[in-house]
Amino acid sequence: MTPQDAAKYSREICGLAPVIPVLVVKDTSHAVPLAKALVAGGLPVLEVTLRTPNALDVIREMATVEGGVVGAGTLLSPADVRAAKEAGALFGVSPGITDELIDACEAEDLPLLGGTATVSEAMKMYSRGYDVCKFFPAEANGGAPVLKAWNGPIPQINFCPTGGVTPQNAADYLSLPNVLCVGGSWVAPADLMNAGKWDEIEAIAREASQLGA
């Protein structure tokens, strides 16, 4: 998979819904019902963060859910990339970028949504053939006004802002021409997962799926 092919795939999955759920799942038994609720609510692209010991098992379970497009977040090393690919991840997301990480994703044919926080980092990704990036942490880095400013000098690059994105500010990002979608954790609250209230999570997802419409 070339960087251009990887970027094309990233653009396609970012176009499936306005919000990509950013998921921290501590109980593997939650994986399938959570994925089903989010997909049913109109959010098919699921980012499972590698922040828990069972994250790879969660990816394996979610990958069995029809209609879901499951990826691995918080990729930090080539070992993470290989493990995520083996678990069934269809794409990867990283908080930042290194040549080592990009090389590993290309070697494993794992499309990467690489994290950028500066214009220079976005330009580095672009020089490698990637025109779709993650913007992280979005709110801490100045939020929607920053991406609006970036669109002037680097309109060729599109972003998925993540980090501090909420239902209240998501529309500010989604209104920008260089934003394809946003990443958010609010769609899968831990208390609702722990209570098994999948219908309520589905309802939250359905509201999120209409953001920016």
Image (tube, rainbow, N blue to C red):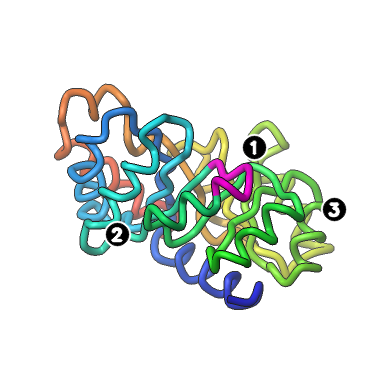
Pinpoint residue 102: horizontal percent, then vertical percent.
68, 58
- Residue at figure coordinates x 41%, y 44% from the top left: 48
The answer to the question of whether label 3 and label 2 lie on touching residues, with beta carbons closer than 8 A, is no
- Residue at figure coordinates x 22%, y 24% from the top left: 194
- Numbered range of the magenta stretch: 74-80
Q: Earlier in the sequence, mark 3 or mark 2?
A: 2
Q: Which residue is mark 3?
A: 120
Q: Earlier in the sequence, mark 3 or mark 1?
A: 3
Q: Amino acid at mark 2?
A: Gly
Q: Label 3, label 2: how many angstroms apart (C-alpha)?
A: 33 Å
Is 75 within the magenta? yes
Q: Which residue is mark 1?
A: 137
Q: Which residue is mark 2?
A: 68
Q: Earlier in the sequence, mark 2 or mark 1?
A: 2
Q: Secondary structure at mark 1?
A: loop
**Which image quadrant: the N terminus?**
bottom right
